[in-house]
Image (cartoon, rainbow, N blue to C red):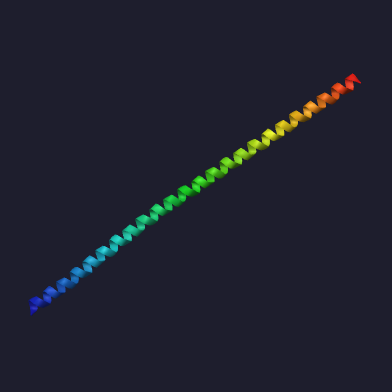
Amino acid sequence: MMKAFSVKSNDYMYVLYVSSMIKSVISLHTLINNKIQYKETEIEEQQKAKEAEEEKKRLDEEKKKKLEEKKEKEAKDKDAKDKEAKDA
């Protein structure tokens, strides 16, 4: 009787041990998945920020080009008016 009780107790302890190990492995797996997901999110945010910065630079360059073209056009118009004034 004592031996049967001891074997039964050992079986219960084994079940508790195995279930505890399984729970630990699942928790570790979840932790690793969360870390991977966090890294991926961080990388995506960095890429979006980089793309936004590049877009801003591109728009700034376009504005500068338009301003330069406008200034050149104004300078040509002024030169043409000056030439007409001299000719008249």
The image quadrant of residue 35 is bottom left
Task: Locate residue 57 relative to residue 68 in the image: left or right.
Answer: left
Residue 87 lies, in percent from the top left, at 89, 19
Residue pictured at 48% horizontal, 48% vertical: 44
Check the image and report above or below for 78 versus 17: above
User: Residue furthest toward the top?
Assistant: 87
Residue pictured at 12% horizontal, 73% vertical: 7
Check the image and report above or below for 70 versus 87: below
Q: Quadrant of the C terminus?
A: top right
Check the image and report above or below for 21 versus 3: above
Residue 53 lies, in percent from the top left, at 57, 42
Q: Quadrant of the N terminus?
A: bottom left
User: Residue furthest toward the bottom?
Assistant: 1
The image quadrant of residue 8 is bottom left
Residue 33 lies, in percent from the top left, at 37, 56
Residue pictured at 46% horizontal, 52% vertical: 41
| Residue closest to the eye, 64 or 12 | 64
The image quadrant of residue 12 is bottom left
- What count of labels does the image hold? 0
Residue pictured at 74% horizontal, 33% vertical: 70
Task: Locate residue 4 relative to residue 69 in the image: left or right.
Answer: left
Check the image and report above or below for 81 versus 15: above
